[in-house]
Amino acid sequence: MPHLRRNEHLKLLANCCNTLATTVFSLGILTPIGVKIWGNPTPAAFNEVEIFASCLLLAVASHLIGQWAITGLMDVDDV
């Protein structure tokens, strides 16, 4: 039975990582679009390419961590 609890924890961790990846990727896409539409009233510390690249990198890293967590799942027959 402990492996079922472990599997659920790993699935929740993977789900959290993938949700974070989706959120960060969306922010990386929507921030530069919002700046183009509404303009930027204050000078930004980073340009749009840096924001997009850092969000994309963080999203991919978070997604890969989620995939790595899924590889730790155990079959019911393994125990």
Image (cartoon, grey):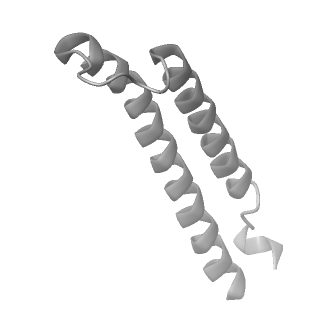
Quadrant (top left/top right/bottom left/bottom right) for the C terminus: bottom right
Provide residue 10's location: percent of width, then percent of height.
63, 66
Task: Pinpoint residue 22: horizontal percent, then vertical percent.
Answer: 45, 39
Q: Quadrant of the N terminus?
A: bottom right
Q: Residue at x 48, y 48 (%)?
A: 20
User: Residue at coordinates 58% horizontally, 22% vertically from top-left?
Assistant: 53
Q: Is residue 58 left or right of residue 26?
A: right
- Above or below 49: residue 15: below
Front position in the image: 43 or 12: 43
User: Closest to the observer: 32 or 15?
Assistant: 32
| Residue 71 horizontal side relative to residue 40, left or right | right
Residue in view at x 51 percent, y 56 percent: 15
Report whether 71 appears left or right of 37.
right
The answer to which image quadrant residue 33 occupies is: top left
Q: Residue furthest top?
A: 36
x, y percent for residue 26: 39, 31
The residue that appears at 58% across and 63% down in the rendered structure is: 13
Q: Which one is nearer the viewer's eye here, 29 or 77?
A: 29
